[in-house]
Image: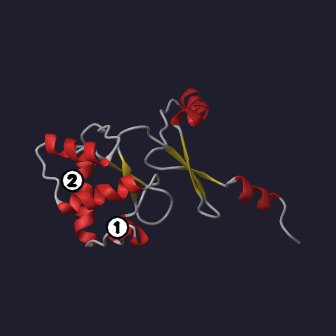
Amino acid sequence: MTRTHRAPPVDAPDLDSALDALREQGMRASAARRLVLGALYAVDTPLTAEQIAGGLAGRLPRSDPASVYRNLEVLERAGLVRHVHLGHGPGRYARAGGPQHEYLLCDECGAVRALEPAALDPVRDVIRRELGHEARFTHFPLTGLCSDCAQAAANPRR
């Protein structure tokens, strides 16, 4: 399996600095790239390409899905965007720089919870100690049941 080359994550705290970083890498800050980056800077949660192309439910102009996918790939290679999987369904995209999040996903209701990586350090420590594996939860989430679904499973209605 070959890995596509990805630049190190670029810390761009706002849209203007992301566009500057793009230009510094010799790339154009086209309208399509501005739209994709604008969508990712408009929210704090990872988005699907379809959500971006759809204009975030009227918050941004709609775009061609194929163009969005092409630009997400370019922006990922540039270190401005990262790809994550949050359960079944399409991949999602988030800003690459700045504080990284790891995710918990409820298998029952689909709720996603973003966490600071330090919150999962005790889990990582057990996995490293017991299995010799360095675990990461940035691309794929840690799955299970949220507290509400776990409580419902433990106390089923009769």
The quarter of the picture where the C terminus appears is bottom right
Q: Is residue 3 visible?
A: no
Residue 24 percent coordinates (x, y)? 15, 40
Which of the two marks, 2 or 1, is nearer to us in this view?
1
Please tell me how crowded label 2 is: few (under 14), some (14-19), or many (20+) other residues with Cα within 10 Å. some
Mark 2 element type? helix
Q: Which colour scheme is used?
A: secondary structure
The residue carrying mark 1 is 60
Where residue 126 appears, x then y in whole percent? 60, 31
The reply, left or right, for residue 41 in relation to residue 140 is left
Q: Which of the 4 image quarters holds residue 123?
A: top right
User: Alpha-carbon neighbours of circle 1 within 10 Å: few (<14), some, or many (≥20)?
Assistant: some
Give x and y (percent) for residue 91.
Answer: 40, 60
Q: Is residue 70 left or right of residue 61?
A: left
What residue lies at 13% left-to-right and 49% top-to-bottom?
27
Find the distance from the CA under tag 2 to the CA under tag 1.
Answer: 21 Å
Quick check: can you spot residue 137?
Answer: yes
Q: Name the residue under label 2.
A: 74
> Amino acid type of disc 2?
Val
What residue type is disc 1 on?
Leu
Front position in the image: 34 or 154: 34
